Amino acid sequence: MDDEQRRVGREIQRRTGPTFHVATRLLPPRYREPTYVLYGFFRIADDVVDTTVETDPSAQRAELERIRTAVLGDRAVEEPVLRAVRALRREHDIPAEEIDVFLDAMERDVSETRYETYEDLETYLRESAVAVAYMMLAVLDPTQGEAARPHAKALGEAFQLTNFLRDVKEDIDEYGRVYLPRRTLRAHGVSEADLASGQFSPGFAAAMRTELERAERLYRKGVVGIRYLPEDSQFAIVLAAVLYAEHHRLIRVNGWDVLSTRPELGTTTRLKLVARTWWRWRRDPDPEAVFYDVSAVSESSGAAIPDSTPNLERRPDETRLSSR
């Protein structure tokens, strides 16, 4: 990879993924630069389908196929990030299958906008979040790669589910997608019309709690495997998990209402979490212990988390706590 390829990947991540960017910056250079490039690739593909402009689905599919050919083929490629991904594939032995299934997920977003059950959603997660996790695992190249693999899968799924919970209103308003399983919504008396209109209710709060607890079970499984990663990469991965999971605290504090307020981490919050995680890491670099001491996820399901008591009866027009 050349400097231009690294620079473009880094800038894409800084601009579009500030939370993950904070953790990436704390990786050693041999992992950091490839991570910038991979994130740039993911965003380039994602932007093909995440657009509010009226677009012909066949044109979107054609563009994704062009990206696939650029990364997996042999023809000359102009885009710096796509050239860099091709180089990364060779250097880190990233399986072509993971590139393929990730781009399959982007194609799925063109036409599939609803998921009946969580099991249906898992197929999408395998193609998107888990493919990303496996590509990152190839870059980190742990000596116990097979042992780390199921935990990397779980952590990738957890991060993606956190994004879905955070972005419920944005996904339906801007992209016409609903990633909360229909079965969960129906079980709590929530309709898609309620989501589209921003109608917060105790039922919606209960649906959010159900899916948030599912995500937190995945965080618990995921962080177990951080100990299998190279030692000099572990802090950054723990920090990424802490930062993503912090959205759960905001969701709880705001009474599970993500329809009127999108939970976002401000710069001050991120910096405080970096400092707290680093201070705890310096005392004892145990990934699980650090995660449970600092993050918004408890070590066991149902345990109390400070400042995160849900209020299911809170009205949607009440003042929300700032996420900044």
Image (spheres, rainbow, N blue to C red):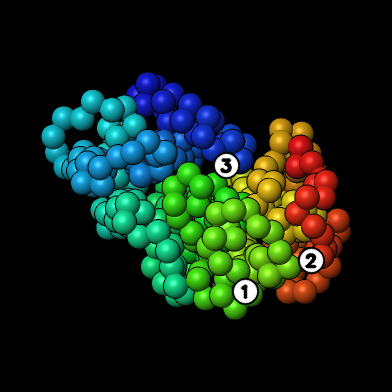
As drawn, the residue found furthest toward the bottom would be 187
Q: Amino acid at mark 1?
A: Gly
Circle 3 SS class: helix
Indicate which label's residue lies in the foreground, 1 or 2: 1
The location of residue 86, given as percent across then percent down, is: 27, 39
Q: Horizontal placement of 150 versus 312: left or right?
A: left
- Kindly report the distance in space between the C-alpha atoms of the residues bearing marks 2 and 3: 30 Å
Residue 41: mark: none
Residue of label 3: 20
Mark closer to the observer (3, 1): 1
Q: Which residue is mark 1?
A: 189
State the residue at coordinates (26%, 47%). Answer: 57
For this view, does 299 lie left or right of residue 98?
A: right
- As drawn, the residue found furthest toward the top would be 4
Within 10 Å of disc 2 (Cα), the crowding (few <14, some 14-19, many 20+) is: some
At numbered mark 2, what does the secondary structure look like: helix, strand or loop? loop
Q: Cβ–Cβ below 8 Å for labels 1 and 2?
A: no
Judging depth in this view, the residue of 301 and 253 nearest the camera is 253
Per the image, the residue denoted by label 2 is 312
